[in-house]
Image (cartoon, grey):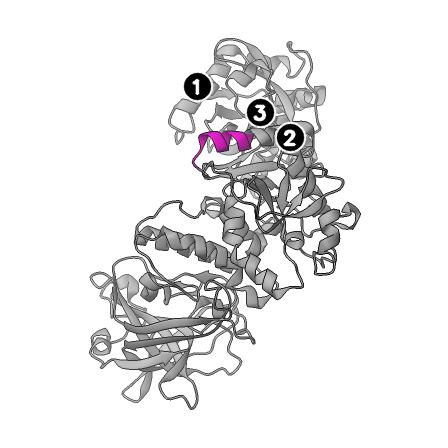
Amino acid sequence: MKWSTYLVFVTSMPMRNGSLICDICWTTLFKFENFQQAWAAQDLDKSDLSQGYRYLTQTWKEIDDGENAGCNWCDYLWGDILEYRKKRSDQSLRTEEWPEDGEQWWITVRFTKAGTLALYIGEDFFPCGYEILADHDDPSASVVTGREIIWQVSSPKSFALAKECLENCSMNHDCQTVEIPQLPTRVVDCSDPENPKLIPGAAINAHYAALSYVWGQAQPHSTSSATIQAYMLRIDINILPQTIVDAVLTAHSLGIRYLWTDTLCIIQDSPEDKNQEISRMCDIYQKAFVTIIASCAKKAGDGFLHDRKRPVSMSLPFWTPSGALGTMQVQDQERSPQNEPVDKRAWCFQERLLASRALIYASHTMQFQCRQGIQNVGGGHNFWTVKGRDDLRIPIDKIGERKAWHVWKSILAEYSRRSITSPADKLVALSGVAQAFQGCWDEDTDYIGGLWKNTLTQDLLWHRSGASTRVARPITYRAPSWSWAATDGPTDGGGWPGPTESLVAIRKCQVTPLISDLAFGEIQGGTLEIEAVVRSVSWGSASLDSNDVPLFELCDGKNKEIGFVYHDCNDPSEQREGYAVVLAELNKAVLHHLVGIIVIPVIGMGDTYIRVGFFDVHAQIVDESYADEPFCDVESWLKTLKKHITVV
């Protein structure tokens, strides 16, 4: 049903026959016994769509008359039946195609445990679904858990509900230790939100809030060597962008005196101060009592405390199982926005991952997230549609190597798809996460330019993911070619499903940090020395919108297709010859694969190479489903004498 076309807002009227629905609807679905049949279906087999209250509707003319007279259930039937006919005929409805006056439909109505009302039309059970809500003081609230989402996010009630979420988490969850932390180097004192000021925090132990937001524009108000002394006395809120102003008010309204925000708490024209504070980013966000996320703001000037669009809803009678008659509000299922501005930024991803608790100002409402999950503040249903993104979190305790590696791989996949303003920050913007993640492994390990020492063979098998468009290799050096940080765009963190056996001996793998004290930050060089099977290969031309291209090996004077290459970058030189370096053997008993990296020589440096791609080849398969797949002589490859090479 298209709400914008068919629905208008209807206020609640006195509950009696005819106030919200017509007489026909009152004697069918909204008769107590029938309504309870629909309500009880939530405990039955959800795959059996016939479970619930099934009945034959009134005629189309009666539905149309009821809708015109103000019957809210006829309004739903009217729109959903037209949508059903449109989808079933796969044509746009024209007036003459509307139902005949006497036409009727079998429908099934049932409630679900997810807090929705499901409606199935016709013998083919065409589905329609709506969210059901209740006012907290209505009789229906005893069994209907959904509440209207908060759309006035700056109201005293909204701040009070947010405080309840924070207090409940801090008292009842294991999301953060109860110790009161030492404040960061500098924080904003929000005790007077009209006159905030910068204060040194090193000597103070107190709770504080941190801000995560998209800059999106120049920040002339930033703390500098010239302004820091004045800011210690007072910061004029008139020069601050709205997002910072809103963050100060939010912290104050939550009863939190101190706020950390990068633009004010880091001396932006001091490289030494920036490096020092970036190295502490892990602690700053992990120890914050709450991170305020300006999820909806495209730039700092937008702010996030403005009223949201109030969802359109309609009122219908609701019978509780005990026989009390109340009212439920019915509306389209509100889904959390999938592509908020902060969801595109690399720095914001790190800040959200590090946060023990987050108050998220989304485009449609305000949300609270901790290690227990994400919820709409105030009890509104949260129909989250981005599977996995909000389940990502850094484990608190040590976990097994395999589990830790899979979590890291998921983090890398999400991080690599995000944009970053300064290419030099590719590793820096993930440094806090890497620092926190180092404590998750069963055994101590080193972080080497975006890879982990104890899973190095798997990590070296990273490759561009999906059908993402390849981009040119960055001009400015930021990582060795064997690290994913040397490229841009979505990346698969490596590894392969099924049994994997390493075929490479790693003799040396190290990087040189740009700043010696920042082991997780920028690097100025790196070397990988290995002993592995190295085979001469060539490959076909690549298109910008395709990742894989054919891989060839010279056999009996002819090029034979043996597998696929996944290029790291768009190479303007269009070089199509190099070497396949075998790193691992996969699924030997089922689908025998060899995987590794494609390298090309560095001119004038002997056995030194740079990585340009990832390859996958497999043995000939008897299974007919793989009859057309390219294959190579895997046994011959495995008998090749290993070679010592260096990759930079």
Identify the mark nearer the N-term, 2 or 3: 3
Say whether marks 1 and 2 touch (CB < 8 Å). no
Which residue position holds label 1?
A: 40
Identify the mark nearer the N-term, 3 or 1: 1
Marks 1/2: CA–CA distance: 34 Å
As drawn, the label of residue 15 is: none
Report the front residue among 484 and 43: 484
Q: Quadrant of residue 14?
A: top right
Q: Alpha-carbon neighbours of circle 1 within 10 Å: few (<14), some, or many (≥20)? A: some
**Magenta-drawn stretch, dominant element (helix, strand or loop):** helix
Residue pictured at 53% horizontal, 35% vertical: 375
Marks 3/1: CA–CA distance: 17 Å
Which residue position holds label 3?
A: 133
What amino acid is found at the position of numbered circle 1 in the picture? Ala
Query: In the structure shown, which secondary structural element does the residue marked by tag 2 occupy?
Result: helix
Question: Is residue 167 highlighted in magenta?
Answer: yes
Q: Alpha-carbon neighbours of circle 3 within 10 Å: few (<14), some, or many (≥20)? A: many
As drawn, the label of residue 158 is: 2
What amino acid is found at the position of numbered circle 3 in the picture? Leu
Identify the mark nearer the N-term, 1 or 2: 1
Q: Residue at the right extreme? A: 238
Horizontally, residue 456 falls left or right of residue 215, namely left
Q: Which residues, given as a range, are shown in magenta?
A: 165-174
Residue 354: image x %, image y %?
50, 48
Report the front residue among 231 and 460: 231
Q: Quadrant of the N terminus?
A: top right
